[in-house]
Image (cartoon, rainbow, N blue to C red):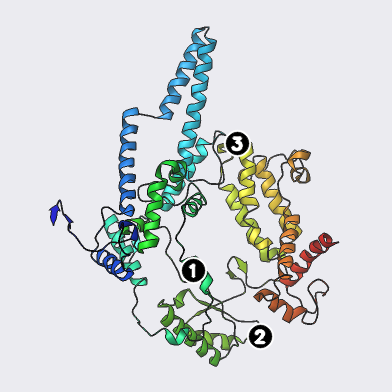
Amino acid sequence: MGKNQGGIAILGDFNSITTPEEKSGGGDMSLSSMTAFNLFIGDNDLVDLGSPMYIVPQKLKLCSHKLVQWQQSNRSNSKKEIETLKARLEEISTTGICGGIEIHEVESKLEKAYLNEELYWKEKSRVKWLREGDRNTAFFHRKFKVCTMGNKICRLVGGNREVVSSQADIARVAEKYFTGIFSSTNQVDLEPFLADFESKVTAFMNRRLQKTVSDEKIKRSTFSVHPQSAPGDDGMTVKFFQFYWDIVNEDVTRAVKSFFEGGRILKSFNHTNICLILKVPDAINMSQASEESCDRILELLESYESFSRQKINLSKSAIFFSNNTPDTTQEILATTMNITYIGAQDKYLGLPLVINRSKRATFNSIKDRVFKKVQGWKKSLLSNGDHQILIWAVGEAVPIYTLSCFRLPDTLLKDIHSISTQFWWGQHGEKRRMVWISWDKMTRPKSEGGLGVKDLRAHDLALLGKQCWRLIPQPNSLLARILKGGYYRYGDLLSVDKGVLPSWGWQSLLQGRSVVEKGTI
């Protein structure tokens, strides 16, 4: 046993191994022996210095040090290089030097320096919807500054309402919070809860799950992640592993396989930065507005807490009552459950709980969200081509979830079109600009002289038609059974009318059905 600078090294013949790969020849080592040895290593916070999982982070750390040394020795700074090249180009132009070849060389170097500067800030901004190559350096730089400010935790409020601001105190409060929510305080027997569950994993499925992971599957998984995603503590994003896969693939593959074979992962592999506070998934329960139903719901929540060992946060829960429930009943039941009740103006998953008679008033918040998003960007930071990309990323993406559920008024969609059009022509704030091309021409395909911008009115009908089409081959889905019980119990989806007192969701779906009918003719 050796000790150096606070670290302890344990050497010797342990008569055991962590994975089958460590043994050559002879009989197979028992699984129980390897499991016990791995538990010993994990329980004592030890690290196998020869394990593939230890080798990978050590090589990454060494690579990071080498990159820092290379940067310091090369002094690569594209911004300074741009200034130097611009000064040289100005010198050639003002002195009247006849050097066509030199001018061409300086211009080529300057173009490359601009691209390197833009690429540098794009990598730091982590913008995924816009590519480099269009002189958007200022935009990427601004995005990086905004993200840096938004991702920085300046202070936290602890459990006893203490406000901390130092890095050490912030780390202490965060660690205490996560330790609390991931610690169990109510150990119960789970067998009664599992007694009525049917086994869904067949023997064949189990064998497939236990198969040795292949090299190809590891590579496919690595390349399925966006290059700018999943940065580690060392700053290495997935792009590093994808770009240098021919170099790192053997070490990475061995490390992944060692996890699946030994069942152990180094704690450093799970080190991450705090980005989101996890919460329990949302759940909806519908029942009669009575004290008996409330008692039953509370029993179910208590059973869920015992089974999942997760505490329900009643302060973040809510009750919604139908219009025919008396106000006194609402107050009594909400008090009994100690849960706040909400009104028709509130939303769930971004959708309104109640659709008012005025559809425009109900969905007008979508237009406000698009307007705020678009006005948040400065036109001067983006090229004309990138305006179109931003229109796709914001003007079309923000309302898409609502469009797939409800038919929005044409007047509202026209206002959203107007916001996109004004942004395209350079409006900022309340100052409007002249629109030189109609919206109909902008929505034409590029092959026909348009910009290829989507018409949200047609897009709305297409998404609703897709929802309708999904219900036909899936008649046993929850949504299909609810709609069938309410509107076409003795008929089929393609022939039924809207019925009596139809909801706006059902009416919207029927408008999407018209698209399906046209496609089936």
Tell me the distance, in whole angstroms, between the alpha carbons under discs 1 and 2.
54 Å
* Mark 3 / mark 2, whichever is N-terminal: 2
The residue type indicated by label 3 comes to: Ser
Quadrant in which the N terminus appears: bottom left
As helix, strand or loop, the secondary structure at mark 1 comes to helix
Residue plotted at (48% across, 36% down): 119
Q: Name the element at disc 2.
A: loop
Q: Of label 3 and label 1, which has the lower sequence position? A: 1
Residue furthest toward the front? 26
Q: Nearer the viewer, residue 326 or 451?
A: 451
Judged by depth in the image, the label closer to the viewer, 1 or 2, is 1
Q: Residues within 10 Å of mark 3 (few under 14, many from 20)?
A: some
Amino acid type shown at disc 1: Arg
Q: Which residue is mark 1?
A: 207
Position in image of residue 468 (x %, y %): 74, 67
What residue sits right under mark 2 in the picture? Answer: 324
Left or right: residue 155 versus residue 448 is left
Residue holding disc 3: 383
